[in-house]
Amino acid sequence: KDIQYIYSTFYNKLEIARFDSNLGKYVGYTEYGVKQANYWNNIPSEISRRKAQREAYCLTTVGIDYQAA
């Protein structure tokens, strides 16, 4: 539960939108990013894919990271 997966999208070095696994949805940070976030949030497969990436990437590598430390 302490692991957070964040997927950010950038344009011109400016973060426009981000998926936050704690929120379970995209959040927009610019006018365009808000529109994109709303679009992506209305696609169930996109939200499921990001949630699955948290499970596949974060939860499988956390054990490796703790062993290395």
Image (spheres, grey):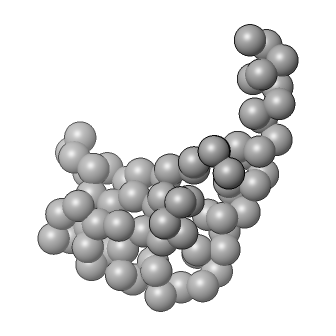
Residue shown at the point (47%, 88%) measured from the top left: 42
Of residues 35 and 11, the one drawn nearer to the viewer in this rendering: 35
Query: Relative to 5, is 61 above or below?
Result: above
Residue shown at the point (50%, 50%) measured from the top left: 6
Find the residue positioned furthest to the top: 69
Residue 33 horizontal side relative to residue 24, left or right: left
Q: Quadrant of residue 55 in the image? A: bottom right
- From the top left corner, tell me how far across and down residue 63 is, in percent: 83, 30
Residue 1 horizontal side relative to residue 5, left or right: right
Residue 29 horizontal side relative to residue 39, left or right: left
Q: Quadrant of residue 17 in the image? A: bottom left
Residue shown at the point (70%, 43%) measured from the top left: 58
Residue 47 horizontal side relative to residue 69, left or right: left
Residue shown at the point (15%, 71%) measured from the top left: 31
- From the top left corner, tell me how far across and down residue 22 is, in percent: 53, 60
Q: Quadrant of residue 24 in the image? A: bottom right
Find the residue positioned furthest to the front: 1
- From the top left corner, tell me how far across and down residue 43 is, in percent: 53, 85
Query: In which quadrant of the rendered image does the C terminus lie?
Result: top right
